[in-house]
Image: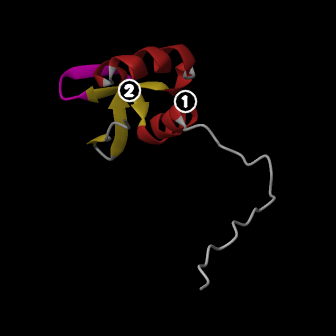
Amino acid sequence: MLKPAEIYKGIAFVRISQLPAEQKEKIRNSIKHDQIIKILIGNTLADDCVQYHHYKLWFTETFAPPVISSTSTKTTRTPSLTKTN
């Protein structure tokens, strides 16, 4: 499930440490390291942030549902069943 963004001083982001376990593991192994940013929130340095648009793109690419393609465009018709007396 896509995590909602946190917003601090106009920056929309997610913290990797607060993602579900499966996402946390996958994002650490696949996202570009230069997309992980640090944000000083009050006196706390959050050093595992990803801008929300990067997270959303990563999530879509990683957890996209499989594409089902049709192998045939042929349409078959079922004869109508009518009762005659």
Specify the label residue 82 is tagged with. Answer: none
Q: Is residue 11 above or below residue 14?
A: below
Instruction: Identify the image quadrant of residue 23.
Output: top left
**Viewed as shown, does residue 79 lie left or right of 58?**
right
Label 2's element? strand
Magenta residue check for 1? no
Identity of the residue drawn at 35% across and 42% down = 11
Q: Is residue 71 left or right of residue 13?
A: right
Q: Which residues are magenta?
A: 41-48
Judged by its main secondary structure, the magenta piece is strand
Quarter residue 67 falls in: top right
The quarter in which the C terminus is drawn is bottom right
Q: Position of residue 12 (x, y in %)?
A: 36, 42
Q: Residue 21 placed where, x, y %?
A: 34, 17
Which amino acid lies under the numbered mark 1 shown in the image of this protein?
A: Thr
Q: Is residue 75 above or below residue 21?
A: below
- For marks 1 and 2, the one nearer the N-term is 2
Residue 15 placement (x, y as % from top left) = 33, 26
Between residue 73 and residue 35, name the one nearer to us. 73
The residue tagged 2 is 49
Percent coordinates x, y for residue 53 in the rendering: 47, 42
The amino acid marked with disc number 2 is Cys
Residue underneath mark 1: 62
Q: Is residue 63 above or below residue 48?
A: below
